[in-house]
Amino acid sequence: MVVALAGLVALVSATLLASFTFVAQASAAVSAQELRAADGAAGVTVVQTRLEADRDAQAERFEELLRREVGDVVAPVTTLVGEPLTLTSPDGAFPTSRTSLVQAEWVVEHADLVTGEWAGATSGTPSGTASGDTIPVTLPEVAAAELEVEVGDLLLLGREADTTAEIVGTWAPRVPGDPRWFAFASSEVSGGVAAAGPLLTADVEAAGGRPFVRWSVVGSGADLDLAALTRAAFGLAGLADAVAADDELAPQGVTSSGGLATTVEELRVAAEAARTVCGVALVLLAVIGAVTVSQVARLLAQARAGETAILAARGAAPAQLHRLVWGEAAVCAVAGTGIGTVAGLALGRVLPDGGDSSTAVLAAPVAPPASAVIGAIGVGLAVAIGWTLVIGAPGAGALRGAGGRISTGDSGRVRRAARSGVALLLVGAAAVSVWRFATTFAGPAERRTALDQVVAVGAPGLLTLALAVVGLVVLVPVWSALELLAARTRRAGTALALRSVARRRTVLGVPLLLLVVAVATSVVASGYAGSTTTARALVEDTRVGADARIGYGGASVVTARNPARTAQDVAAVDGVDAAALARTLEGGAGEVDLTVLALPGAGAREVLRGGTASADALADAITTGVDADAADSADAAADAAPARVAPGTLTVTAQLAWGADADLIGSRAERGALPGTLGGLVWLGGAGGEVARLELTTADVADADQSVALTAEVPAGDWSLLGVDVAVSEGTLRGWWGFVDVVLDSVTGEDGPVAGDFSHLAGESRESGARAEGLGGTGGAATARFTPPVPTPSRSWSPPPSRTRWPSTTATPSRSRSPAPRSTRGSPRSPTSCPVRWTPRPCSRTSPRCSACWSRSASRSTVPTRSGSRSGRTATAEPPAPTPSPPCASRSVRTPAP
């Protein structure tokens, strides 16, 4: 029995410690992973001040301050930035801009050299020196492309252009989202003022001036337990003030930016919440364990009652018996606690691994500080003392009256008063804890104090004990009533039965206590199970889709310098098995935010992965009916063959014209001339599903019915015409809204007219408001859209409710052609729109350029793809979204073809 008692203590201690260790290490691993995944401004805090004469001493002082204020969870990345300089070209090849010299030794480790060589970024010695005072610099590849310069070209620096820099190489960042690159190409730490370059050099002072030192504080990869997160969160929040307060470090002030402090604070709140949730369950488990161990100790004391009486009869002193009881309790408690601690630590370190590399950093042996060791020893002693009291109290209580000795002066009132006081204190503590539990976690996390959380964590456990005590107190009148009934009954059998029940309160109180504890545990466990199921379902919802979705950055205009990005670029990456283009469209239905994800029907099965629904079920739902719809609309598809556009110059001929209703406001002579400026966009679709947006040149018209030519350069590739937007500035239409038509005459490519007959082109014109953005930045425009036809959908559908209202004017084809129907205010969209059934189930698109789509409801623009990255398997590539246009473009011309 003693061994069983020690085993129970070890089991409860191991379970408590293993659970706590598991949650702590899992929380630290998740926090470290989230901090590593933070990119851009969210993963860095940038601090900038003037560079002092003694650079090394200044750097050491900052590192010392960082360790003192924040700890070892972050590390500084030093960059020396020169004063802003005017950048010009000797031959005027690019307009004047701003730039700065930068000296950063860490760049070579986080960037790839594209052409040429480094300008002494590591050794401090220029790898290529030019004659005279020429400064060798290395330029980012993007900046070189924008300035249209290459290796060997010269740059002029300074307001007087008195400093010459020679480009000796170009480079590109290895991971563009790395926090180290935040504000790197900006003349200020916030990243808001763009600069050309910067010019990476070996000596930041080569162009004169007094440079700045910029420290980018990023995560160091160290353990991120709750204590480290708490220290780092408060330290980062006041880092700029701490630097500014040090006159030797920043005598001329400091500027800072970045969101690392906010990120760490969010991680701290999440880790604190995880520990709190775990603490609630652990407190309840400790209560259950204490009740179980105390009842086993009580059974042991009752089993030894005869032996105790014999020892007392043979002359054993009560003090000697008490020493035996408490000594045995101490041995069981210490042995059980020690074994449980060792087992709990071992089990807690095994559980989080599970083959996950993200927790590998936790397996490295780290020497704990002395304060942590002392704290652990103190906690172990407190736990051992607690178990000693739980085990020894029942045995010590059984020693009263051992050997038949009963104290005549002991009436039991003191014990009853003590029991009543303990019960009242327990009920009061439970009430306070439940009150703090309801108020603390209902408010914002920023207002929670450590004391509030400690008090609130014990609410379920204390409430369980309080309910058990209340149950026992409620039964006291029942016992008294049974004794009174037994005294009044005349039948001996009934009286004996009633007295046997009424006088065995202790024996019958044990199952009642266990019953209350079991019911309370079941209630709390069901709450945890329900919360876990809901959280898992939400996670599975976000995992539906593909393993990763990649959004291409950069310009949306496809040119010879900026070629179209296709799925082949992603499929060529090692570890990617399949890739497909995807298009997302944000929308809303009432108060519910929606995200529509369009995928090509042919490649959907290869890139999808399942969550709450299997990948095969998703693919079948998306592709079901696509073939049938395509067969039903084969004739219409043949009539709507894509209008091919050859690479080269594309000429769009358009004009302004008075509408049919213009005579209502006066004759042609009374209306006068209709001058204006025409511009526009051409939308092209590639064979791989990419969309190109080409800007047309602008042209002035003197009056209505005057055709002008607008041109654009079509890049190399297999392109088809998706649509043409022709816009006229607001000044032309002032006072004539609704009476002016934008007319498209022809579209001509290098190999002749494109889709020669424009009688099928349906123009849809929209009037912009007073503050609308015009195509040419004039403050307003009326835009007419002309799109080639697509097959009539064979399935019924209704357009989704739009949150934006676009009032219409009129637009017609050239009067030399057969006119197309005008769009009127409030009219439904033309059949050129790609049909989408806005239901939570997949539907089919019957356009030849869009074979499948998938629509599902989501909360707050939640995309139905896994947000995190996962190496291997599949990926979907999302090309850059074109410049915002009227809503019809999202469905009729901007949805990529499969």
Image: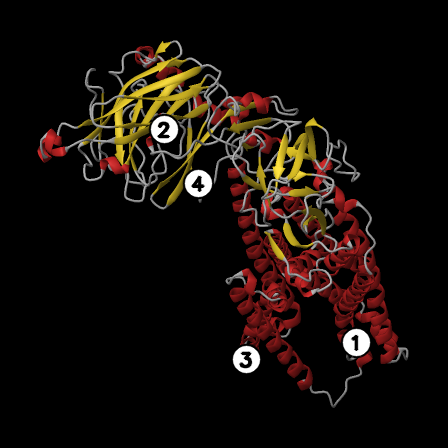
Q: Distance between the residues labelled 3 and 4?
A: 67 Å
**Element under disc 2:** helix
Q: How far apart are marks 2 and 4 (CA)?
A: 19 Å
Query: Is residue 848 in view?
Result: no
What residue lies at 30% left-to-right and 23% top-to-bottom?
A: 786
Q: Which of 353 and 741 is in front in this view?
A: 741
**Picture coordinates of residue 638 (x, y %)?**
33, 10
Q: What's the colour scheme?
A: secondary structure
* Between discs 3 and 4, the one toward the N terminus: 3
Query: Is residue 72 in view?
Result: yes
* Between discs 4 and 1, the one toward the N terminus: 1
Location of residue 823 (image quadrant): top left
**Element under disc 1:** loop
Amino acid type of the residue tagged 1 in the rendering: Leu
Q: Name the residue under label 4.
A: 858
In this rendering, which labeled residue sits more in front, label 2 or label 4? 2
Amino acid type of the residue tagged 3 in the rendering: Leu
**Picture coordinates of residue 384 (x, y %)?**
79, 65
In this rendering, which labeled residue sits more in front, label 2 or label 1? 2
**Element under disc 4:** loop
Amino acid type of the residue tagged 2 in the rendering: Arg
Height in image: 130 above or below 303? Answer: above
Question: What is the quadrant of the N terminus in the image?
Answer: bottom right
Q: Is residue 463 left or right of residue 376?
A: left
Q: Name the residue under label 2.
A: 891
What label sits on residue 399 in the rendered view? 1
Q: Do the residues labelled 2 and 1 touch (CB within 8 Å)?
A: no
